[in-house]
Amino acid sequence: MRVLVVVISSISALRGLRRDLTTYSATKAGIAALAEGIRAEMIGTPIKVTTVYPGYIASEMNEKVTQPTPLLVSTKKGVASMVRWIEREPAEAMIPAWPWLPLSYLIKYAPLSSVRRFS
């Protein structure tokens, strides 16, 4: 019997962000590290662990955001992408893959002074 554990983190986990996102990004990074530790522990067993890093997906959590969010996708599109990636059972998945997979590299490795402008 195979088991898939899915852990939901956030693109915000990739870097420490400023202002009101500091705590949010820290907790999401902690969740991602926890999932990675469990994934390492489960190597060689039928248990697989996928960490999902959603970008901006419309939800109750962000429905009151007033600033422009150009990369926001609908709940339907975000969930459909999430389901497709979870079914593939990757170790990690940026959701939706476009544009978050390429942006995740920029977020993670760009100079902090550059990333600061986006938080």
Image (cartoon, helix red, strand yellow):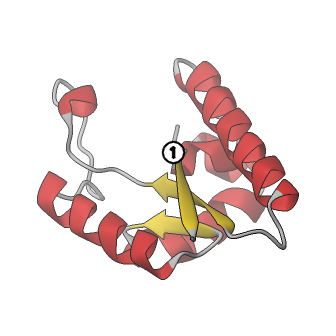
Residue at the extreme bottom: 88
Residue at (64% x, 58% y) in the render: 107
Q: Position of residue 79 (x, y in %)?
A: 24, 60
Which of 60 and 108 lies nearest the eye of the viewer?
60
Q: Crowding at label 1, few (<14), some or many (≥20) Cα neighbours within 10 Å?
A: few
Quickly name the residue at label 1. 118
Q: Which of 4 and 10 lies nearest the eye of the viewer? A: 4
Q: Percent x, y for residue 106?
A: 65, 67
Q: Is mark 1 on a helix, strand or loop?
A: loop
Establish if 21 lies above or below 114: above
Tally the marks. Answer: 1
Q: Residue at x 80, y 60 (%)?
A: 42
Give x and y (percent) for residue 96: 36, 68
Q: Quadrant of the N terminus?
A: bottom right
- Asked if residue 84 lies left or right of residue 51, the reply is left
* Res 105 seen here: yes
* Residue 16 seen in the current view: no
Q: Quadrant of residue 73?
A: bottom left
**Residue 97: x, y in percent?**
43, 75
